[in-house]
Image (spheres, helix red, strand yellow):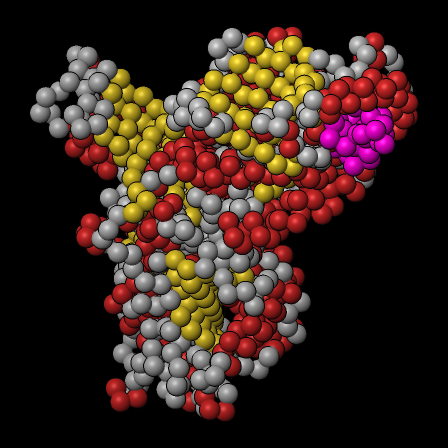
Amino acid sequence: MRSKQHSLRGIGALGLTVLLSHSSLVLSFSLRQLSGTATRIPGVHLKASVVASPPSSPILQDDFDDVAKPRGAKNDWEVHKFGGASLATAELYRTVGDLLIRESEGREHGTIPTMAIVSARGGMTDLLVKVVDSALLNFEQAIVALQEAVESQVSLLKELAPPEITDPIEARFRSDGQDILSVVQSLRMLHTVPAVTMEVVTGFGEIWSAQTLHAYLQTQNVPCEWIDARDILVVKSDSSGLGEKGAASTGGVTPLYEITTERLSHWWNNEGRNAGFLDLSYEKGQVPIVIVTGFVAQTIEGVPTTLKRSGSDYSATIFAKLVNAGRVTMWKNTDGVYTADPRRVPEAFPIASLKYDEAMELAYFGAQVLHPSAMEPCIDKKIPVYVRNIFNPDFEGTIIQGRCATLKDSFDSKIMNWRSKSGFVPIKGITSVDKIALVSLEGASIGGANVAERFMGAMADNDIKVLIITQASSESSITVAVPENEGQRALQVLENVFELELSRSKINSLSVATGMSIVAIVGEGMAMTSGVSATFMTSLSSANVNIRLIAQGSSERQIAVVVAAEDTTSALRAAHMAFTLSETTATITLLGCTGNIGSALVRQLQEQKTRLAQEFGVSMCINIAANSKKMVVGENSQCLDVDNLSSLIKSDEALAFDLDKITNLMMADVHPLRIVIDCTNSEAVSEYYERWLSSGINIISPSRKVAAGNLERYKCVRAAEKANSVSWLYESSVGSALPICTTLQDLYETGDKVKSITGCVSGTMAYVLSSFSEDVPFSEALRAAVEKRITENDVWEDLSGMDMAQKVVILARSMGMNVNLEDVEVEFLIPEEFLKKEYPVDWNEMTAAQLEDIKCMDALMLERLKAATAEGRRLRYKFLIDKETGKCKCSLVNTETTDPLYRLKLYENLVAFETSRYETSPLIVKGAAAGPDLASAGIFADLLRLTRSFSSNQG
Ligand SMILES: Nc1ncnc2c1ncn2[C@@H]1O[C@H](COP(=O)(O)OP(=O)(O)O)[C@@H](O)[C@H]1O
Ligand SMILES: N[C@@H](CC(=O)OP(=O)(O)O)C(=O)O
């Protein structure tokens, strides 16, 4: 095992002494370098590995091996990167070590030289950041954090290998801890934290992590070594600070490949040779495993630096390029790159494949899973990058390879509307960057003064990272998105630059707005399709998200918007769903879920769900279900298990029914297609219709409470529907599943003039009147109808004619008539006093009493039947709506043989439309229309209508 004891130890507070020992590398530290370092971190007892150009090698030129072609190996190198989450515990270090051994054993083509780039153990970098950050504010806290950092790594190490391996490593960790302590102490004298201090201290996480994994691999007796990347990787950095995970940036760090290649080659021919890597017998299964510290590097001046937060991904691809690897695998704690951050969008799922450019855009706009620069090194050598889950290694994850078509290519190709090609989704992923400020210059009237150039020049000169720019063509208005913590500085800088113009009022205003986030959709498919940005914007507006700025990259691979920070998650989820990246087509609140119609609907949804998903790509998600007493709610907007709905509502999980709570939950749901299905007959529920529609929630109502209720309320609800571009559908409230309302709407919308509508829209009336006879009394026919569950719960609603009258109101209103229920002339088939009578609350008892009472009508009804039969006619309960006279009527009539109702059978409904176009022969809609199954089929049809019209809206 090799010892790396290269430290810079301070002997005086402001002095800098170098104590460096390295088996093969010669220290050459120029005075300029030393003073350079000293000016950056004066007084710092810096431990750094400083590598100058390789010494004259003792190795003969013939003997010099190319690291990219390991002597004797049949396969290329493969590089694996393990992030902090994959190295959080001793168990995980073992898992990683075993995985490396397995991978190095190869697949069908023999052993594979293997390189592992390791991050700090999970949470370590944050802890080291805390050590530095708290040094000035709370020194005690810094010490505690430092102790925790060292001790946690030591105890993890000791779990992995015996003392003969771990003792020297532990000693190094502790000595490193002492060095960090010196650095931190010196900060107290400086009263400031030089940028390089953070880079030096945080890098120790990776240095310790690599040695920890190396300790474990040594116990497995495999040829292995570890590399401190600060000895090899030389970079040029044009940005200060570590950055933040998931911040929008390109990092600003460029590897210097020539010198880095030289150093790696030198390492291979010296350290590697000493480790026996040049003499391995690959056929016999011997293969090198080289562990490299991620994240850390060195500047050309020899100062330790980093590749910025999440930079180990970048280290991995840089080393992959250096050794010309066959592939890079980034091992993460997720099943690959997701369509959106899974912590914010629970519906997100792993993307199977991405182009390099798409991955770069996603990373630039904040997808924390990848470092923004990480793709660069793989592009020219076409090295595929796999993103896989260490906790689910059998899953394929995401593969990143290939370039996107250029803008010119897309100009040459045929543009199509993305919704016209079924199954095609132009968007691969949706990301966000938090903590953004918008800086705006408005109302410039400075002819020829080149406002944009001065604006952007000021940003560049002051090192302010501009993430998005939008500019009005006149240059009179420019807005840029910058990191929030740069917002005020950007404003000051601009105030200085445009001081003169501001004082002469040649610029209206310069302003900064903080508390913003960028939300971006990414995918190469958008360059070749139309309708993408319309879908994006519509989804945001349906989620009530206000857009502050829009920008589309010239590559047409991304569209970014800036929104208020508190709207970010809604925006992400809404866009995710609008592009059907989520499977759920609609989220549904089902009211009255245990009633006759509600439970029939649940049954149908259960039966149809696979077919709907497979044939139509529609997935309905019942998210809230309630009856009049209880309600159940899917956690985090997740779907309830439809197969278990009835037991869920009886379980302890069920909450007390609360319409306000339901409304708030629906309003918080950002799904662009939210639907309430009102299968209740509740007046209380109908009071919420207007509010729901005004909040962008669609309604499907078999309930007639609103459609046939108070005219003023009906009008308000309709107005809310129109104003909010949502739908209120109630096809199932008239004639169950028969297309009566839609037919009427079609006639109306196509300009036909509906003169009158007649027919029978009561299944109970149709059944009873066509089945009672001299042998079967009227009351017995009604009993049969009750048993067949085709009546309303309260059979008086049917027999009073009020059920039919409500449907008449609905149809008349659809013809543009201003009618209320009182305007319908209704003939009762029961004595009026029955309606005022008090019946038991229990349904069975109430119905039994009603069936007893109705017997008094048997004789009278038989008489009417006989009279009709004597004339060769049939008894039917018929409605009439006459547009011209405004008359609406429901009555018992003796129908002639020519009347379409004459042949109406048991369960049937019939509606005849007499219109200008259908003058000679009315348009007739007829069919079975009774019972919960048909009613729920009507709701189902409305549901599908809504999902269809929603998707066409979006294109
Ligand atoms: N689009 C995305 N796909 C996958 N993960 C994402 C995405 N956006 C954000 N993340 C977050 O990034 C995390 C993985 O990135 P990171 O923590 O940097 O990994 P590691 O440290 O293991 O390299 C995931 O746990 C997830 O929470
Ligand atoms: N440890 C560094 C570098 C890195 O890339 O880590 P991770 O792979 O865990 O994101 C960081 O936390 O930023």
Report the residue at 53% width, 39% height from top: 944
Q: Is residue 291 left or right of residue 221?
A: left
The residue closer to the viewer here, 217 or 329, is 329
Dividing the picture into quadrants, the one containing residue 629 is top right
Horizontal side, residue 916 vs residue 866: left or right = left
Task: Tell me where residue 871 appears, x and y as whole percent.
Answer: 70, 22
Does the segment drawn in magenta span residue 794? Answer: yes
The tally of labels here is 0
User: Quadrant location of residue 447?
Assistant: top left
* Residue 408 on image: x %, y %: 19, 52
Residue 448 magenta: no
Looking at the image, residue 387 sits to the left or right of residue 96; the answer is left
- Residue 510 visible somewhere in the drawing: yes
579 lies above or below 629 = below
Residue 656: % across, % down: 77, 28
The part of the chain drawn in magenta is 768-795
Residue 666 in view of the camera: no
The C terminus lies in quadrant: top left
Image quadrant where residue 894 sits = top right
In the image, 775 versus 437, the foreground residue is 775
Image point (25%, 23%), residue name = 441
Q: Which residue: 51% across, 35% down?
A: 946
Residue drawn at the location 43% of the way across and 79% of the way down: 113
Residue 252 as seen in the image, left or right of residue 608: left
